[in-house]
Amino acid sequence: MAKKTTRHRSRKMPDFRRARIEALQQRIREWKTQALLVTNDRDIRYLTGFVGEDSWTLVPARGNAITIISDSRFEEEIPQVAPGVKRVIRQSTSLQQELSKLVKKHRMRKVALQQSYVTLAQKKAIAKEVGASKLKPVDDGLLKQRAIKDKEEVKLIRKAVRIQEEAFQRTCRYIKPGMTEGEIAGYLEMQMRALGAEGPGFDTIVGAGANASKPHYTPGRAKAKQGNIILIDWGATYEGYRSDMTRVITLGRWPRKIKEIYPIVLDAHLAAADKIAPGVPLYDIWKAAHDVIRKAGYAKRFRHGLGHGIGLNIHEAPNMSHKSKGELEPDQVVTVEPGIYLPGVGGVRIEDDILVTARGHKVLCDLPKDMESAII
Ligand SMILES: [Mn+2]
């Protein structure tokens, strides 16, 4: 049926993207397959620049014939956002039928599948067209690669942080007693978009008063009153890359109990952040924060992980918790976010994004963390 394969020579693939593909191709050869079928949207964006749904990318073990199989909705966009990548625009055929044609054309004997991102139904449909014996499910491979950020990625995360910080400052000037959590969240997200974000990094958390004790609360109709704290956990997405911060502000004055726990959380945050450097066990970073909170008597009130990698996903490797194995590596970007939560009273979490450098770390966030600055 009508099908187009187009090679765009007008614009070259950027070097950083070629480097990402070459690193992946090495793994594809280690798996002893002739290609990897990339079905995860974030991985497709990482490798090609293309953002779209219902599309697959076939990456051969060698050479430049990276092919996106998509449909007519994305026909114009693909050569613009993914220069140097081939495209197959399917019309009356299925993704797996087009995949099968490519596999035959390039005489591929084995194709690796991302087992975390292919459903059983998809695998069955692919096997029917390509042949079950030609498929090799593999551990996706790209999560590990994506945990180490290249310069382009760090640049985009820094930009996301700048946007989220500016939007937060604008929001602090906007907040008045009597506003609902939903209104505050909506204003913050609108400002991030106005500043160039694709959208929030994740569902914005705004918890007023006692609602701040729920670590992953969904903002609603509750109003922020004079004398209430407001916990805000928010982030921006800039060209796919996410940032993630948490601050607690207060309208007028600090409630007594919050005044007691805030400095403990801040000490825990700083203790963990100070330790961040290549080669430090992930567990030790969690423990640095946990020790501070435990010694203050709040061990039972800090039950979530200490931090996570950020990138194209809001939660990615590495993870820092009591279960973590492994060590920090240069060019990872992680959050540090200890918290203490008192049901019925409120909670405090303080979160920054931190780049692991060759010898230590660089805090990417500039917003103040002291109690004075948080009174609005
Ligand atoms: Mn976070």
Image (tube, rainbow, N blue to C red):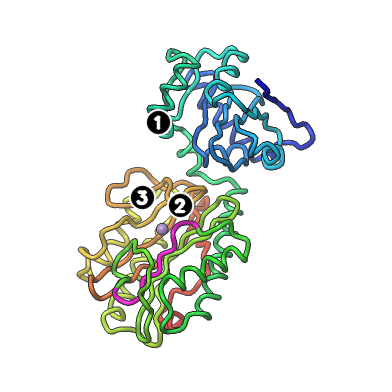
Q: Earlier in the sequence, mark 3 or mark 1?
A: 1
**Mark 2 and mark 3: Cα distance apart in space:** 18 Å
> Which residue occupies the foreground of this view, 124 or 91?
91
Q: Nearer the viewer, mark 1 or mark 2?
A: 1
Say if disc 2 is inside 8 Å of ligand 1: yes
Q: Which mark is residue 282?
A: 3
SS at mark 1? loop
Q: Which mark is residue 75?
A: none
Q: Earlier in the sequence, mark 1 or mark 2?
A: 1
Say what amino acid the circle numbered 2 marks. Answer: Ile
Which quadrant of the figure shows ligand 1? bottom left
Q: Earlier in the sequence, mark 2 or mark 3?
A: 3
Label 3 CA crowd tier, 10 Å (few <14, some 14–19, many 20+): many
Say if disc 3 is inside 8 Å of ligand 1: no
Q: Which mark is residue 314?
A: 2
Say what amino acid the circle numbered 1 marks. Answer: Thr
SS at mark 3? helix
SS at mark 2? loop
Q: Is residue 249 left or right of residue 241?
A: left
Chain part drawn in magenta: 201-210
**Contact check, label 1 and label 2, Cβ < 8 Å:** no
Image coordinates for residue 145, horizontal then vertical, percent: 50, 38
Residue in the picture at 54% in, 68% down: 165
Say what amino acid the circle numbered 3 marks. Answer: Leu
Asked where in the image residue 79 lies, by quadrant, the reply is: top right
Tell me if residue 297 is in the magenta stretch: no
Image coordinates for residue 361, horizontal then vertical, percent: 49, 57
Q: Which residue is mark 1?
A: 119
**Mark 3 and mark 1: Cα distance apart in space:** 32 Å
